[in-house]
Amino acid sequence: MDVNENHTSEVSRDLAILKNKLNDSERDKEKTFSELRSIRGGIREKIVLVRKLKQERNSLTSEVRNLKEERKKLNQSLKEVITKIKEANSEKKKALKGLKVKADFAAIKREIEAIEHKIETQVMSHPKEKELMKLIKERKKILGEAGEAQGAIEKAHQISNEADEARKKADNVHKDIQKKAEESQKKHEQIIVISKEIDELRAKEKELFALADEKKAAIENINEELGQKLSEVSKISAELNEKKKEKRNKREDGRNQRYESQQRMIKEKVAIVEEKLKKGGKLTTEDIILMQGQD
């Protein structure tokens, strides 16, 4: 084996090493791109989730804003009712101050109604009925004397009920505000957490993208080196083929030269035999065989 063949063997080993290196780099690059695709998919999913959470948070924020406006109106209404209660209580106090009799007017009304019902539904003696009628008259007199106070009391009671209802509505709206504001805050906190995760994934994506570019560049370098090695192998192979061709040609030339030399020797021997024949000389067995070969 000459120097060129040794060189070819070395280049062939280099080619095998480069091909293995290329295969390893391709697998490594595909692994990096697979991870990159996975991260990008995760980013897309999280972005969709953040958009959904933002819509829900904004909707809740809008509801809270509307509820606060409603609460403001209810509180204003409650203030007005409280002012009315103070005025009604003041009127009631003045009315009750002028009364000689302090009584539960609602109870007196119920008592009158009960006595009237008794008279209408029960059979009783005339004196008994007369006695009950007198009682009704006395009770009505009390109500009559307290007519102005009664109106003030009923008005104060009615306004107090209105205040209780307004306060209840305001409290319910306030609870609803707290609940929705809490839900909105939770979604906002989720958005912050997921947005941070997206930023981390984007940083990892950037890192992997740079790594993928490095691997692509490395593969290009290996391919370029492979191309150079293949060109070198091709060149050496061509040179070896040319040398082999030269050797074949030399062998053929040698064979041709030997053949021609043999033919010249045969011709010379034939000429000697023919000269013997002309002179009438005796032919040897070798001479006879040689002449037969010329036939």
Image (cartoon, rainbow, N blue to C red):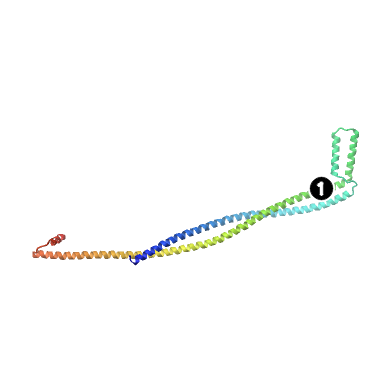
Considering only vertical position in the picture, is 200 above or below 97? Answer: below
The N terminus, quarter of image: bottom left
Give the camera-side residue of 222 and 13. Answer: 13
Give the camera-side residue of 63 and 176. Answer: 176
Give the camera-side residue of 280 and 87. Answer: 280
The C terminus, quarter of image: bottom left
Considering only vertical position in the picture, is 232 above or below 79? Answer: below
Three-letter amino acid code at the position of disc 1: His
- The residue pinned by badge 1 equals 157
Residue 44 placement (x, y as % from top left): 56, 56
The residue at 80%/52% (across/down) is: 82
The residue at 68%/53% (across/down) is: 180
The residue at 81%/51% (across/down) is: 85
Residue 120 visible in the snapshot: yes
Neighbours of disc 1 within 10 Å: few (<14), some (14-19), many (20+): some
Secondary structure under badge 1?
helix
Residue 168 placement (x, y as % from top left): 75, 50
Considering only vertical position in the picture, is 62 above or below 268? Answer: above
Say left or right for 191 vs 157: left
Considering only vertical position in the picture, is 87 above or below 274? Answer: above
Say left or right for 5 vs 45: left
Residue 235 visible in the snapshot: no
Q: State the residue lying farthest toward the left.
A: 280
Q: State the residue lying farthest toward the bottom.
A: 3
Residue 256 placement (x, y as % from top left): 23, 64
The residue at 24%/65% (across/down) is: 254
Residue 197 placement (x, y as % from top left): 59, 58
